[in-house]
Structures are given as structure tokens and as C-alpha cells.
Image: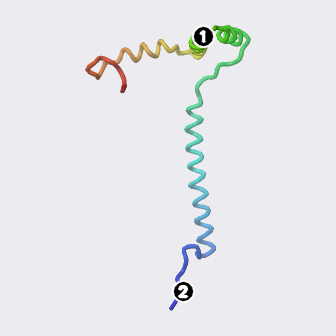
């Protein structure tokens, strides 16, 4: 009776070829995921200029956490170019597809 060949008992050339193929596929996946994160992170950052730091400190000095958060959101929205209210106004211009008149999936 002949001994059966194991899947790991490939010729050296076949092992090298499969290792290189695995490396290429793995590298492609890493590049694709990295590119997706890079594209998602392309949003503008708020630069820590003295004026921004002063306004942020004034926001953090507010007594209520909700007021602090709202103040900081307003600061970021005013510095990022597109205000949140403008974005909401655009969303409100869409026709409603729900019978109760609300927008969205919720």
C-alpha cells in the first residue's frame, strides 16, 4: 500500500507559490481597508488656534454638560465649513416617504 500524500507535503516550488499568493492577497486586503479608513478620515480637523482654544475654554467653563457639548458642537460646526443646521435643512427638503411624515428609518 502506498503512503498517502499529505496536503502539507507539496513541492518546494508549490509552497513558495502559495506563500507568495497568500502574501499578495493579505497585502491587498490591508491596502483596501487602509484606503477606506484614510478616505473616511479626510474630514477637516479643527486646528488649535488661540481663538479656538479660547472659545473651547469658555465652552468647558459652562456648568451643564449638555451646554458644554452644544457649545463645542457649535464651535466645530462653525469652523468646519458646513453648519449642522444647513445639513438638517437639506434633509428636511426631501419628500417624506413615511405615512406619519417623519424622515428616516426610525
Q: Assess disc 1: are there few (<14), some (14-19) or many (≥20) residues with their C-alpha within 10 Å of its C-alpha.
A: few
Which one is nearer the viewer's eye here, 84 or 98?
98
Tell me what residue is drawn at x 52 percent, y 89 percent.
2
Say if 45 sits above or below 67 in the image. below
Viewer-nearest of labels 2 and 1? 1
* Spot occupied by residue 82 in the image (x, y as percentages of width and height): 53, 15
Are the residues tagged 2 and 1 within 8 Å (C-beta)? no
Which one is nearer the viewer's eye here, 105 or 35?
105
Please identify the residue farthest to the front as the structure is shown: 63
Tell me what residue is drawn at x 60 percent, y 76 percent.
11
Circle nearer the N terminus (2, 1)? 2
Q: How is the image coloured?
A: rainbow
Which label was assigned to residue 64?
Answer: 1
Mark 2–mark 1 Cα distance, whole angstroms, equals: 77 Å
Say if 100 sits above or below 29 in the image. above
* Spot occupied by residue 50 in the image (x, y as percentages of width and height): 74, 11
Say if 55 sits above or below 26 in the image. above
Please identify the residue farthest to the left as the structure is shown: 99
> Dot 2 lies on which element?
loop
What residue is disc 2 on? Answer: 3
* Spot occupied by residue 32 in the image (x, y as percentages of width and height): 55, 44
> Dot 1 lies on which element?
loop
Tell me what residue is drawn at x 58 percent, y 53 percent.
26
* Spot occupied by residue 43 in the image (x, y as percentages of width and height): 58, 25
Which of the 4 quarters of the picture holds residue 6?
A: bottom right
Which one is nearer the viewer's eye here, 63 or 90?
63
Which label was assigned to residue 75?
Answer: none
Please identify the residue farthest to the bottom as the structure is shown: 1
Which one is nearer the viewer's eye here, 74 or 40?
74
Amino acid at each position: 500500500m502506498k503512503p498517502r500524500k499529505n496536503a502539507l507535503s507539496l513541492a518546494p516550488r508549490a509552497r513558495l507559490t502559495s506563500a507568495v499568493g497568500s502574501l499578495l492577497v493579505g497585502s491587498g486586503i490591508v491596502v483596501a481597508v487602509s484606503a477606506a479608513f484614510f478616505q473616511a478620515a479626510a474630514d477637516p480637523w479643527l486646528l488649535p488656534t488661540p481663538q479656538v482654544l479660547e472659545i473651547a475654554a469658555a465652552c468647558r467653563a459652562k456648568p451643564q454638560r449638555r451646554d458644554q457639548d452644544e457649545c463645542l458642537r457649535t464651535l466645530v460646526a462653525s469652523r468646519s465649513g458646513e453648519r449642522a443646521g444647513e445639513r438638517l435643512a437639506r434633509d428636511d427638503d426631501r419628500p417624506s416617504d413615511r405615512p406619519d411624515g417623519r424622515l428616516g428609518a426610525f
